[in-house]
Amino acid sequence: MPTNRPSSLVSKAKWPLFLMANVAVLLVVGVATIRESYRGWTVDAEIRSLEQKAQSLEGRKMQLGELAAKMQDQAFIEKEARSKLGLQKPGEHVVVLEGVAATQTAWQLNPNVQQTNPSDTDSNPKRWWNYFTAND
């Protein structure tokens, strides 16, 4: 029986080394898996942000294309030349009003026109009822 004892001691001594080696391998594999998962998530997030940026740039491209098409229209060019550069056709006379901004509209310039605001005491449903049932 003494011969069995040394072999069992050797086998018992190998178990902790075997377990430690397995734990080390699992740790290395786990860390590598977590790193690759994180890298995949960051790449996916970057792809989503780039797709959103591409969509916004496509929208901007469409807006600029519409503006370029509008700028080719002779009526638009004439309107912009009149409003921004103060140009006029032959035979036209320009009238400059002091104290009035060029961007003000006619309804802002006429102080005699009274605005028809609904009464503040009426409820919103009553205002809608009056709107649809009023005889003009």
Image (cartoon, grey):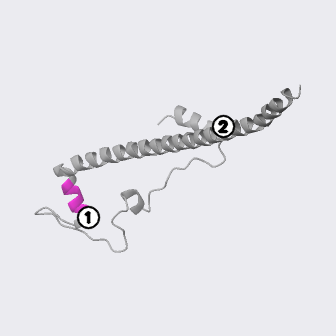
Q: What residue does disc 2 label?
A: 26
Q: Quadrant of the N terminus?
A: top right
Q: Is residue 67 left or right of residue 15?
A: left
Q: Amino acid at mark 1?
A: Lys
Where is residue 90 shown, x and y percent of the image?
10, 63
Number of residue marks:
2
Q: Disc 2 or 1, which lies upstream in sequence? A: 2
78 versus 6 height, above or below = below
Majority SS type along the magenta span: helix
Assign a secondary structure to mark 1: helix
Where is residue 113 shown, x and y percent of the image?
44, 57
In this view, the residue farthest toward the front is 2
| Circle 2 Cα neighbour tier, 10 Å, few/some/many (<14 / 14–19 / ≥20) | few
In this view, the residue farthest toward the left is 90
- Magenta residues? 77-84
Q: What residue does disc 1 label?
A: 84
Closer to us: 112 or 108: 108
In this view, the residue farthest toward the bottom is 98
Q: Say whether residue 79 is magenta.
A: yes
Assign a secondary structure to mark 2: helix
In this view, the residue farthest toward the top is 1
129 versus 59 height, above or below = above
| Circle 1 Cα neighbour tier, 10 Å, few/some/many (<14 / 14–19 / ≥20) | few
What's the residue at 79%, 34% (across, down)?
10
Q: Is residue 66 left or right of residue 91?
A: right
Mark 2 and mark 1: Cα distance apart in space? 73 Å
Q: Is residue 82 left or right of residue 24?
A: left
Where is residue 39 shown, x and y percent of the image?
53, 44
Q: Quadrant of residue 83?
A: bottom left
Q: Amino acid at mark 2?
A: Leu
